[in-house]
Amino acid sequence: MKDLFMTFNAKKTALALACGLVTASSVFAQTAPSVTVYGRIELGLESANDGAFTKTMLQNFASRFGIKGERGFSGDLSGIFQVETAFSPEDGKAQNIATNTGYLANRNSFVGLKSNSLGTLLVGNYDTPLKSLDAGGFAGTLTGEGEAMEVIIHGKGTKTSGSNFDNVHTRQTNNLVYLSPKFADMVVKLSYSPDESPVDGNAANQPLYAASVEWNNGTYNLGIATQNKAVSTKAFGMNATKLTMGAKMGNLSGALVFSALDNQAPLAANARKTTNSLVVLNFVDGPLTYRFNYGMSGESFSGAQDDLTMTTFEVDYALDKQTYLYGSYSQIQNSAKAKGTFTNADNFPAVGVAGNDPSALTLGVRYNF
């Protein structure tokens, strides 16, 4: 009888221990962090012309490597992080800048808290709401040199034409960002970056504020964003407003984007303002996708002759969901005093003579992982 009792008690203890391990394992599975490795490698063979000289080169187009993770604390609250770095597979540099030896976390990198009911709070190096607003993903669809959002809508083309104007295509360091949960098909984004200036307050770095509201029902998209950086010792700041409209109807999708950029210069002689527009069309036909965009950037003041246009045609061929080949042709047409150039160029074509029209013919491959 005693042996029977001891056998029963041992089995009971073993069963209790097994249950405890299962329970502990279940709890651990619920709270264990998830970490994802992701990235993109994109290279192209490009024949580029700066308006006077043609050059053939192997080109990197924003290849990047990243890790991100999330861990649930309780119920609705999670901790999140991301570290993303640009690199250039064809020459070992981080980006397409000859003097840049690279640094970790030079793309969107942050730590934060995420709540499905209250929204997400991020701290780190992160795109402003104005930069990230892209008509539900229908505006920034072209690859290679064809991306016109930075050149036309965010002002790079005007910036390269002269002084007293800056590019608002801002991935902001020291950034505090709030992303709201989706409600009534709308998402609100807010960001604030302090000036980080020394005690005297005269540094060129100034506080930056940005906000956006975007409505997206899966078929139609409407968004508006604003961004402001105060006047500094550079004698100007930058204020920007951006409006996006996007739609998807069967195999056809597209977007209209408009922006107004103002350098807020206190001296009338330094005042610069532009109004800009961009149209994007995408059509899917089996493994083939045809893409087109056309953008216009106006003069920064009457008679400045620094206005420009940008046109791109592109054809993509999908090998699978992660890999595709593409061919594209892009051209910028500069007015007499404009020096607009492409976003990704390996310092070429960087227009040295005002009024020259750069172009690029590209055959590329993109692999997403």
Image (cartoon, rainbow, N blue to C red):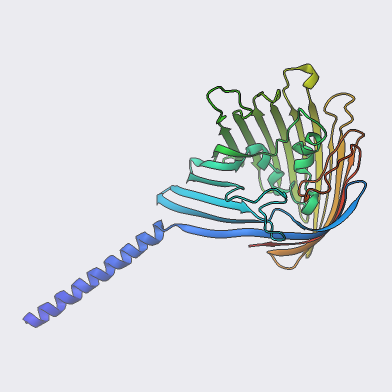
Is 345 rendered above or below residue 121?
below
* Placement of the C terminus among the 4 image quadrants: bottom right
Farthest-out residue, left: 2
Left or right: 105 as drawn, with respect to 131: left
Residue 351: quarter of image? top right
Count the numbered circles shown.
0
Position in image of residue 211 (x %, y %):
62, 33
For image coordinates 81% across by 40% down, the residue present is 278
Q: Residue furthest front?
A: 99
- Of residue 48 and residue 330, the one placed in the foreground of this image is 48
Closer-to-camera residue (192/360): 360
In the image, residue 286 lies at what x, y percent? Answer: 79, 64
Task: Please state, as top left, top right, bottom left or bottom right, where the N terminus lies in the image.
Answer: bottom left
Residue 105 visible (yes or no)? yes
Residue 181 appears in the picture as rendered: no
Q: Relative to 331, say whether 204 is above or below.
A: above
Picture coordinates of residue 288 (x, y %)? Answer: 80, 63
Indicate the position of residue 69 as horizontal and vertical percent values. 50, 54
Question: Would residue 248 appear left or right of 74 to someone viewing this image?
Answer: right
Residue under the image location 35 percent in, 59 percent down: 27
Residue 11 picture quarter: bottom left
**Nearest to the observer: residue 198 or residue 328:** 198
Q: Residue at x 58, y 35 (%)?
A: 190
